[in-house]
Every structure is written in C-alpha cells, then in structure tokens.
Amino acid sequence: MSAADAGAPARPAGTFLARANPLSKLTSAVLLTLAVLITVDWVSAVVVLTAELALLPLLHIKVSTLVRRIWPLLAAALIGAWGTALLAEKTGTVLWEAGPLLFTSGSVAAGIAIGLRGLAIALPGIYLLTSTDPTDLADALAQKLRLPHRFVLGALAGMRLVGLLVEEWRTIGLARHARGAGPDAGGAARLKGFAGQSLALLVQAIRRATRLATAMEARGFGAADRTWARTSTFSSVDGFVFAAGVAVSAAAVTAAVAAGTFNFILA
C-alpha cells in the first residue's frame, strides 16, 4: 500500500447500507432487537419486521434471494411458532382440538409472536453481515470504541475464517463423494458421514486458527501503537441509519402499547 493511502477514509461500497459506518448499523440493529426483546407480542414484531423487509431495496437483495439465504431461520421460526402454540397457556377461543392437541386464540397468538420475533431479531444480523466489510467493522471498533487491538484483530480473523470454513466444508464433501461416500448412502451412513465431515472441519479450523494466531503474533499484531490504512468516519448516511433505528424501535413499542398487546418480558 502506498503512503498516500495511509489514513484514507474507508472506501464506500455500492449499496446504501454499505456506505454507512459499521457502528451506526450495529447500533440500529441493537435498537431493533431490543424493541422486540422487551415485549412478547406480535404487533411490535410486525412493525419491526415490516421495516426490515422495506430495507431490501437498499441492499439490492431480492426476496427470493433472501429466502434462499435464511431458509434455516424460517424453518426455525415455524418450528418455534408451532411449539409455542402447542404448549402455551390455553386462553381465549378454542380454534382446533384433536385429542391431546389443542389450539386456542391465545396460544396461536403467542406462537405467531414467537415466530415473528425470531425473524425480526435475526434479520438485522443478516443485513449487518451482508452490507459490512469485516475490515471496516474492525477499524470502527478499534478507532471509535477504542477496544483492545488483540480483541478486534482476533474478531476480524474469526470473521474472515467463516467464509473459508464454508469453502472447506464443500471441499471435504467433494472429497468424500470422490471416495464413494455420496448421497446414495443409507440414512445411518449419511449421519456417520456428516459427523466425520464435521470433525474434519473442526480439526481444520483449529489448525488454521493456530497458524493464523502465530502469524499475527509474529507480525506484531496487538502492539500498543498502531497506524491505520483507512480512517473510520461518520457521514450523513450514518445519521439516517441511526435515526431510522430509533424511529422504528419507538414505533414498534408505541404500536404495541396502543394495540394493548404490549407484554413486558420480565412481567
């Protein structure tokens, strides 16, 4: 890197949210999460979830693409909603009953609230990871929050390794298929193969992390005095992102109180 690049601001990416400072996005994500966490009701979750889905154009992500990325979260939300509706306190009108299975308006509302809350909590994290470069996040944590360099650089290394682990998993799977342990194997064989592949990935991750930690220590990472290739700065985009987080959080709580569904989680 040339001397002219030292101290230059972080280069903005293409999307609107990508141009925002990671700290402003992180703060807004925390605000949205808190608005859903402090109350167990479906109104606040609907408000937050609607606002989050409205952000899709700012990320240049299609709904179909988002669904493909978060289908495990959707499945978990459906399972959580079903389990809550089945086990929650039976209040209100009986909607459906079949033997031991009993669903009432109160239990179904609780299930819907849990499912929507799960999605509303998960989406800000997805957006943050999708629109944020790990290096920019590390720069912001170290320069703005003054977090210890060792912690920041360790977190940066961990975020960078996530993508490598995904590729490593695919490589291990291809190697297994080349040895004949393909999808035609029976259920028990598949389960055994999955466990073996997971163990191989864990061993590879530990080895890679050990080598990376040794290399970072040898190159002086974590030293007391550091210089920065890019300066973490705030702009008008960050003001909009922060204000949007505050407004949506306040609107969610206000809507829940006005609808009479606000249910403080510690009550």
Image (spheres, helix red, strand yellow):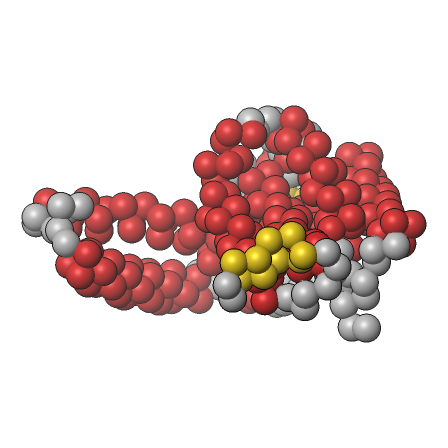
Is the residue 34 above or below the residue 68 in the image?
Answer: below
The residue sitting at 72% across, 38% down in the picture is 50
Is the residue 199 above or below the residue 53 in the image?
Answer: below
Q: In this view, does 175 lie to the left or right of 222?
A: left
Q: In this view, does 137 lie to the left or right of 191?
A: right
Q: Position of residue 38 (x, y in %)?
A: 78, 62
The residue sitting at 88% across, 54% down in the picture is 260
The residue sitting at 88% across, 49% down in the picture is 259
Q: Quadrant of residue 204?
A: bottom left
Residue lying at the far left in this picture: please name it: 180
Q: Where is residue 103 in the image (x, y as percent from the top left)?
A: 61, 58
Q: Quadrant of residue 196?
A: bottom left
Quadrant of the drawing holding the C terminus: bottom right
Residue lying at the far right in this picture: please name it: 258
Of the pair 97 and 148, the residue shown nearer to us: 97
Number of marks = 0
Query: Can residue 227 be spotted in the picture?
Result: no
Q: Where is residue 123 in the image (x, y as percent from the top left)?
A: 62, 46
The residue sitting at 55% across, 66% down in the picture is 150
Residue lying at the far bottom in this picture: please name it: 267
Query: Can residue 184 be spotted in the picture?
Result: yes
